[in-house]
Image: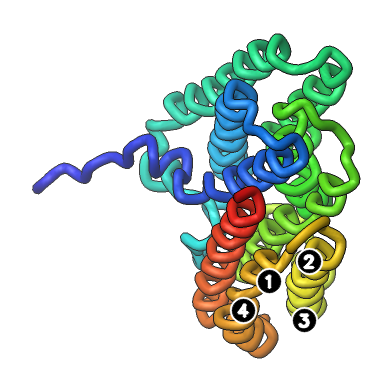
Amino acid sequence: MEKKKKPGIAKMVRAPFLSSILAPLLAGTLLSVSINGYLYLPGFILVLIVGIGLHVATNVYNDIYDTLQGTDKVNVHRNESSGGSGVLQDYPELMGKMFFLARAGLVIALAGTIVLTFFIEQRLWPHLWGLFLLSAFFSKYYTAPPFKLAYRGWGEVSVWFAFGPMAILIAAVSQNIGFHPMVIILMPATGLSTSSILLVGQLIDLEADRDGGKHGVASRLGTRPTSIIYLLVQLAIVANIFSLFFLYPGASWPFLLVLIPYVLIFPKAMGIILKYHNNADRLKEGAKLTVLTHIVFSFFLIVAFVIYAL
């Protein structure tokens, strides 16, 4: 019998989902370019290294501790659009390699942060190191004991904060900008977009989460209220984009492009999630459409800033 091929590193770190951190880092950098009038290339390269390292650690630690705490084991509705990789369920012997990848991600992020310190203004050092330390904490303790944020109802808050305000701000810091008013206005949307994927995943994984003691919004409130929260989160993203359109100085029409997925893709996703909020199998299509909405939203957000910068 032919031996089953073990998954590669891309599968283990859930490489396709790294787009969730690339989008806010690119958007925050491009916003800073429009403020400064130039791209500070060393800062941009280093912040990408820091962000990707932290996200790799987050993804891998999430898989490790969901496996160790039994949540992945009881999940019969695995969802590739928002769930874990499932690597350790099929290949438990890879646990050591997974720990190595998670720790390597943190070490790479730490090294990037140390180097970045010497490339930014001293007034921004507390911002940089505060963001790194908080991100590193979220990265491991999103699922790891003793804090287990996702198991105690803090998962949604930490995901929004990490992929929204924190990612946007660290990108701005890498360009020697702090709490600029436009940076603050941009902060919510990218984190909310990533959180919408998490909410659909919770609907699909509800039984496994409850059995494993993972108490997110869906586990606490039920499927119908969670589907309404999902809708409100998506509408908040639309409102955030309109705020950029109305408040961004100069010709801000490119931001209307960011609404394209909310016209072409999101209505179908919303219909599925509101109608089949308690049907895990039917929700998987809604999860795919939510991820597609997130990807297209992220793409056009970056395109809008590129057009604006030009």
Report the front residue among 58 and 237. 237
- Measured from the top left, where is residue 10 in percent x and y? 39, 40
Which residue, given by chain and number where applicable, does mark 2 sit on? 245
Mark 3 element type: helix
Task: Specify the amino acid type for callout 3.
Answer: Arg
Task: Specify the amino acid type for callout 1.
Answer: Leu
- Measured from the top left, where is residue 32 in percent x and y? 73, 39
User: N-terminal of the two: label 2 or label 4?
Assistant: 2
| Contact flag, marks 1 and 2 (Cβ < 8 Å) | yes
Q: Is residue 276 above or below residue 66?
A: below
Task: Specify the amino acid type for callout 4.
Answer: Phe
Q: Residue at x 38, y 35 (%)?
A: 9
Mark 1 element type: helix
User: N-terminal of the two: label 4 or label 1?
Assistant: 1
Report the front residue among 38 and 173. 38
User: N-terminal of the two: label 2 or label 3?
Assistant: 3
Q: CA distance from mark 2 to mark 3?
A: 32 Å
- Measured from the top left, where is residue 269 in percent x and y? 59, 80
| Contact flag, marks 4 and 1 (Cβ < 8 Å) | no
Q: Which mark is residue 266?
A: 4
Q: CA distance from mark 4 to mark 1?
A: 15 Å
Q: Nearer the viewer, mark 3 or mark 4?
A: 4
Which residue, given by chain and number where applicable, does mark 1 sit on? 256
